[in-house]
Amino acid sequence: MSTLPPLPTIAGLGLLVAIGIALFSRYHALRHIPGPRLASITDLWAAWRVFRGEYYMDVVAELHSKYGPVVRTGPNRVSFASPDAIADIYGTSYVYPKADSYSPMTVLANGQELATLVTTRDEKRVTGIKRHISAGFSASTWLKQEDQIDETISILLDQLRSRSGTTISLNRWLSLWSFDTLTTLAFSETRGFLKAGTDLDDVFASSQKRFAHWRHWALAPNLEALIYKNWLMQKFQKTSTSLAQMAITRIQQRKAADKNATGRDLLDRYLAASQEAPDVIRPHDVVALTISTIHAGSDTVALTTSLALSYALSNLPIFRRLEQEILAAGLDPFVPVQFADVERLPYLDALLRETLRFTVNPNINERTITSSPLGGVTICDTFIPAGTDVAVSDWDVTRSKAVFGADAEIFRPERWLDIDEKTRRDYDRASMGFSWGRRMCIGQHLARIEMKKLVATLVRSFEMEPVKVGEAGWGGGFKACNLDVKMSERKS
């Protein structure tokens, strides 16, 4: 009788050995990086803290304060607290793809991912899309639509003037304005939120829910896909919204006109890009890109503008200096200001830059280190093996005393004034207001135009008295603020 174990037993033992070797190779590869013992075994310890209501950025900042500038946050995750890591991780010399933690942000339609510049992880695809649309996002292109921005600012001014002398939640009005502005720039017509004085389509709540979903599931993307992206959930999931229907209707109308896209508005520019490269930007991509641009652009501008005014009104010397600069610029108080008249106002620019520095992204901003001849890369003198997900801790770098000085945790726009070009570059890099490198926000020029025009117009047109202002925690995936202000129209 043979004393050898049966073949299935041998195969089973071989499989267990292979799994053991794979697990050892994966987890042991980061043994040189400090972190919690549980982090070397599972992501669930951090995921559980996030599910309980904590923010991942706070968890990571806590780990950095305990373990140092390089910390292991999961079996295959490493975080850096040094601004020196930004260029290595997010730069253009070696472009690393976005990590699996972005997967919960993706939206599927009929089993296919809808393309957006935020969630698409295929770098070649992102490069191809940007190649055909980047020209349409230049400052000069957006300024050709400045009259459309003026139209929505005028509607906002009318609404605020009708409430002159009363206390209003200005941040709510800025959200309505920002969304209407983006829909106007996209379709050459407004959705009508401002005139109605309300969110007609529950857009803001759904946007917050989507970012909250990403925040909750970023540390468990495979589990999220299993629960939310299976065939049954996809069958019952609502993928069309009023905004999507608006985009589809406008596309059909323009195609029915049988004219080539002229590029007057964003939808036209996306259609022109699709006509030029139909294999890169497919018809359903046009809808997805348009909608995602509206959401991302309106959220960012409304949030940053509200925070800028809230921070300034929380510290009245800051607001008075801003007010003095704008009132001295000789602007007409009864009409929207022109960007050319406020583009170079130094204190306005400094206020917005400092606000962007304080507007930390609470979500994960990871990249996956791809294979290399050396089996990995060295970041901040630390070897990181290929396949590791890496990120910079936004909270730590935006408040780096090595970059911003001893008062880095204080909101002080003056730090951006009278500095040399190298210091400004260092500040811009560490503040990460519009991200960095290949994935830098393509809409940053439009955002700066909108924010400078709006803040200058509001300060020039109204006296503002703070009633309830300041940070108010987080809402979904965004920093929230109070901006209850008594506004009185200026007479001259």
Image (spheres, rainbow, N blue to C red):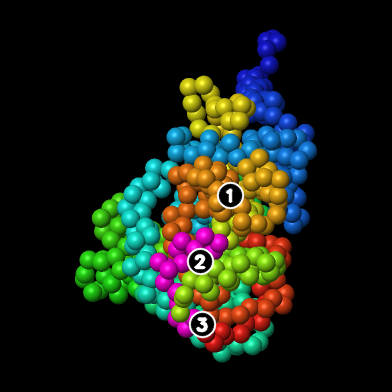
Q: Give the mark nearest the N terminus, 3 or 2.
A: 3
Q: Give the mark nearest the N terminus, 2 or 1.
A: 1
For residue 431, the mark is 1
Judge whether residue 385 can be spotted in this image: no
Inter-mark Cα distance, 1 to 3: 32 Å
**What residue span does the magenta drawing correspond to?**
333-349
Q: Are marks 3 and 2 in contact (CB under 8 Å)?
A: no
Of residues 331 and 181, the one nearer the viewer is 331
Check the image and report above or below for 337 versus 449. Answer: below
Q: Are marks 2 and 1 in contact (CB under 8 Å)?
A: no
Residue 344 lies within the magenta run: yes
Please name the residue that numbered disc 2 is placed on.
451
Residue at 64% in and 25% down: 29
Q: Position of residue 261 (x, y in %)?
A: 26, 66
Q: Position of residue 43 (x, y in %)?
A: 69, 41
Q: Amino acid at mark 2?
A: Met
Of residues 358 and 419, the one nearer the viewer is 419
Q: Amino acid at mark 1?
A: Ser
Please name the residue that numbered disc 3 is placed on.
157
Check the image and report above or below for 304 versus 130. Answer: below
Residue at 58% in and 67% down: 322
Check disc 3: other Cα within 10 Å, few if <14, some if 14-19, many if 20+: many
Instruction: Please tell me whether mark 1 sits on a helix, a strand or a loop.
Output: helix
Q: Are marks 1 and 3 in contact (CB under 8 Å)?
A: no
Quadrant of the image occupied by residue 360: bottom right
Check disc 2: other Cα within 10 Å, few if <14, some if 14-19, many if 20+: many
